Every structure is written in structure tokens, then in C-alpha cells.
Image (tube, rainbow, N blue to C red):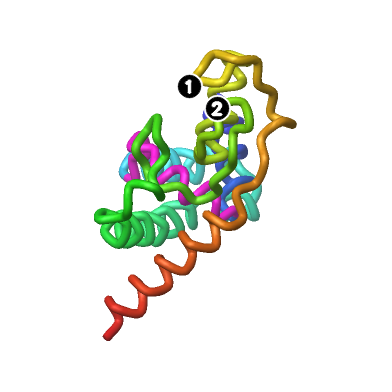
Amino acid sequence: MLRDLCTIFANFAQSPEFCTECARSGYYDAELVQKAAKTCRKLNLLTPENMKSFEALSVSVDVASKEVEDLDELTADAPEEFLDPLLMTFMKDPVFLPTSEKYMDRSTITQHLLNDPKDPFNRKDLTIDMIQPATELKERIDSWLDEKRKATTK
């Protein structure tokens, strides 16, 4: 079972998105990963390529953790219109819900619709193909973020 889990993690270790989500989740434990890597090496459970990828995971997640912290710090005072109205988190990919005329982050509404095919604001039927990209809002968010980044590097 350890071999299977470590192989899966090794295969995803090269994905920046995976490393970012590990860093963001709060469940990642670098010490546990290092112990697993030591056990895999001792028992020769992984191929050399997978072993190298798995051992590099800790470094990649550490880098991603710093990026997540930087982004969290940068977006701490974001305007309310840039926050997902359900989770109050900074929206990275805003979408428009035509049934309630509200904006949400794509990941939030996608997760919601997997459990309940209704608009969370008015309970009208809503499907994933009904949501629309909020390109104008996305442009304003990106512009605001660029300004914040420039201000912090001065």
C-alpha cells in the first residue's frame, strides 16, 4: 500500500498545481513524506525515477507554501467584490451564475454542483455548463493583483 501511495505522489510531484494544493490543504506533513521516502528507499519499493520524484516532493511543496503565503498576504485586503461570496476566499477564476446573477469562484461552484445541482443563492436549477466566465471581473482582479505586486516590490 505504501508503494502505491508513494508512486501516486511521485507521479503528481511534477505538477505545480498538485504541490500548491498540498501546501494549501493543511494536511501535508513534510516529516511524514520524508519518513515514507526513507522507508521506500530502505525497502526498494519505488523505481529510481519515482524515488527521485517522490523525494523532490518536499522541496516543491515548500516552494509552493511560500507562494501560497505570499498570495494570501497580498490578497488579505482584497476588495469584497474579488471574494467568493460563499467561502469569502480570493477568486482566481470568477464565473457568473445566470440564475442568480452572482459571481463565484469556479472551483467553489463546481464543488457545490457536484453535491447539489441548484444555485446556492436562490435554489434554482443550475448546471456547470450554464455558468459563464466573468472575463471583465477577472481582468479587474488581475489588474489589482499586478498593482499590489508592483507596490510590494518597490
State the predominant SS element of the stretch in magenta: helix
Depicted 148 relative to depicted 106: above or below: below
Give me the residue at 37% from left, 33% from top. Answer: 87
**Is label 1 in contact with label 2 (beta carbons under 8 Å)?**
yes
Q: Which residue is mark 2?
A: 100
From this viewpoint, is residue 52 visible?
Answer: no
Q: Is residue 103 magenta?
A: no
As drawn, the label of residue 121 is 1
- Percent x, y of residue 32: 35, 38
Q: In the rendered view of the protein, which quadrant contains the N terminus?
A: top right
Depicted 27 relative to depicted 23: above or below: above
- Percent x, y of residue 117: 63, 15
Q: Is residue 18 magenta?
A: yes
- Percent x, y of residue 150: 35, 79
Looking at the rendered structure, the secondary structure element under dot 1 is loop
Q: On the picture, is 47 further left or further right than 61?
A: right
Disc 1 crowd rating (10 Å Cα; few below 14, some 14-19, many 20+) is few
Which region is colored magenta?
15-30
Q: In this view of the protein, which residue sits in the foreground, 23 or 105?
A: 105
Amino acid type of disc 1? Phe
Looking at the rendered structure, the secondary structure element under dot 2 is loop
Depicted 73 relative to depicted 104: above or below: below
